[in-house]
Amino acid sequence: MARRFSAPYQSEPVSGLASWARNLAVFSVIAVVVSIIIVRFGFLEMKPALATFFGALACAGLSILVGFAAFAAIWQNGSRGMSRILLAFLIDAVVLAYPAYLGLQYRRLPPIHDITTDPIDPPKFEALARLRTGEGTNTAVYAGLYSAEQQRLYYPDIETVELDVSAQRAFDITLGLVNKRKWLVIDERAPLAPRRLGRIEAVARTPIMGFREDVSIRVTADGDGSRVDIRSASRYFESDLGSNAARISRLIDDINTAADDTNLKPVKKPVVPVKPSPKVVKK
């Protein structure tokens, strides 16, 4: 006889597996949020923080498995709890969506973490070098020939910015864009005579986890114009999943746009006062 899903169904107990699936999903969200807070505010070293994050992903995966087991149990004995299973699956999908996207990026992009517009003579990390000496951090020395070759293949648009404005103006534009992005400026030196070379060193953060990525910008005079070279490198991990190249590309576009706006801005001419015509007195 088929089970009647009416009043007798409503009196069936809630599946314990369904409750476990929901509880694991909620716990995974809490663990993800805690891991993000730990990384952003530096409460723990990188390894324990990442262990917390991957533990949260494992809970989400376990929640999915328990949810399928709960679904099978409900199908067999008619107990309640389907809404809890669906809620658990929804939460698990939200938790696992972005890590799944990053996994695809890891397979698609090269395992490099140091991107620059000038691989031959990249901007140096000077003030930032002191921040890259801890355990597990990448060296301040440029990654080298392999990284340059991979960058050329995957990010061919990363090139030196050549501007028709003075080095000082290029420096001011770039520094303004860095401050607008709320990067933490560690050092700034305007392109003063006689060297006419400016530097900006700053720390950027990835959008969600807030991993630190170091940026060094060099502004040099080039005749009546200027050149801007940018280097962005992850402080941790061997692969940046494309974040540094994306950061440099966006900054290049904004620098070019701001410089073009400067060149197109009309020059205000001094207003010459108009002398009133002399009055003719009729006699």
Image (spheres, grey):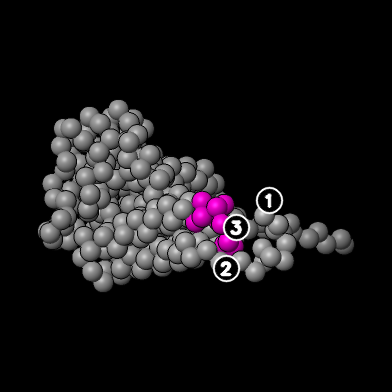
- The front one of 39 and 140 is 39
Gap between marks 2 and 3 measured at Cα = 9 Å
Per the rendering, the mark at residue 18 is none
Query: Which is the main secondary structure of the residues drawn in magenta?
Result: helix
Q: Position of residue 2 (x, y in %)?
A: 68, 51
Gap between marks 1 and 3 measured at Cα = 13 Å
- Residue at the image point whose x is 39% and y is 49% from the top: 99
Q: Are marks 2 and 1 in contact (CB under 8 Å)?
A: no
Kind of residue sitting beneath label 1: Met
- Residue at the image point whose x is 50% and y is 61% from the top: 18
Element carrying mark 3: loop
Kind of residue sitting beneath label 3: Gly
Q: Is residue 275 left or right of residue 87?
A: right
Is 88 covered by the magenta stretch?
A: no
- The answer to which image quadrant residue 143 occupies is top left
Q: Which residues are magenta?
A: 70-81
- Residue at the image point whose x is 59% and y is 62% from the top: 80
Q: In this view of the protein, can residue 89 be seen by the observer?
A: no
Residue labelled with disc 3: 78
Q: Mark 1 or 3 closer to N-term?
A: 1
Per the rendering, the mark at residue 13 is 2
- The answer to which image quadrant residue 42 occupies is bottom left
- Residue at the image point whose x is 26% and y is 60% from the top: 51
Q: Position of residue 30 (x, y in %)?
A: 41, 68
Q: Nearer the viewer, mark 1 or mark 3?
A: 1
Q: In this view of the protein, can residue 138 be seen by the observer?
A: yes
Element carrying mark 1: loop
Q: Residues within 10 Å of mark 3 (few under 14, many from 20)?
A: some
Kind of residue sitting beneath label 2: Pro
Compared with residue 149, is residue 161 higher up or lower down, i.e. above or below? below
Per the rendering, the mark at residue 1 is 1
